Amino acid sequence: MRFYNNGFIIQRAEERQANAYNGIEADNWFFIYRNDKFKAFYDENIGDERSCTDDNYIECCNDKQFLSDCIKYCVNTDQKFRVLFCRTQLPTPEIGEIANMRLKFLGYDYAYSGGSYYSCVRNDLFRNFPEFKQIHLNANGLLKNRLQLERFIELRSTVPEKYPKGTFEYGNFIAYMLYEVVNCTFDK
């Protein structure tokens, strides 16, 4: 399984609790509808129009100037946020070099590439289905290693068939390696 350096997502920061889910499904890009400039850029360069028409695209940003502007906006308007760095199986967008960034590894998630970023990890593993009892989550409520990720994906391909229709979400899910950006400044 190959992972690409895709880019960044800005989430509303919530109070994090140990063993609670802290992955990709959250209030992502929460501030863009309050600023026409951000919304226009998001719609053209990040938003779900691209991910709905391109199966190789994840909704994240690799434009460091836009990220810097977003961070300044959140700071100046006193909005709590965090920045995630995403590595996924999808090749676009790709940010390339990310040297000079301090990243904290959070874990692996399995979710949609955009829109609601619906997470199978959040929605399946926290419901305690017995078939998933051998899957162990880390303190961030995410899969702790690639072996767990691969095992979960394998189980996720068969377990839903055992339950009534509507119990599980179906879709084109992708694997994520998620990191929290520790230093939220971006060089131009």
Image (tube, helix red, strand yellow):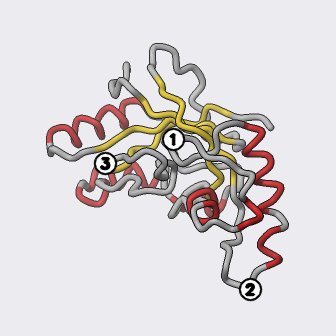
Q: Residues within 10 Å of mark 1 (few under 14, many from 20)?
A: some
Q: Is residue 45 visible?
A: no
Location of residue 37 with respect to 1 vertically, above or below: below
| Residue 139: numbered disc | 1
Using residue 185 as the reference point, say whether residue 170 is left or right of it. Answer: right
Residue lying at the far bottom in this picture: please name it. 164
- Secondary structure at numbered mark 1: loop
| Residue 15: numbered disc | 3
Which callout, 2 or 3, points at the residue further toward the start of the chain? Answer: 3
> Given contact means CB atoms under 8 Å apart, are the residues at marks 1 and 3 in contact?
no
Q: Quadrant of the N terminus?
A: top right
Residue nearer the viewer, 94 or 178? 178
**Please, what is the three-letter code of the amino acid marked with disc 3?**
Glu
Residue lying at the far top in this picture: please name it. 100
| Distance CA(mark 2)–CA(mark 3) | 34 Å
- Secondary structure at numbered mark 3: loop
Residue at 64% across, 39% down: 144
Camera-near label (1 vs 2) is 1
Name the residue that disc number 2 marks.
Answer: 164
**Please, what is the three-letter code of the amino acid marked with disc 2?**
Pro
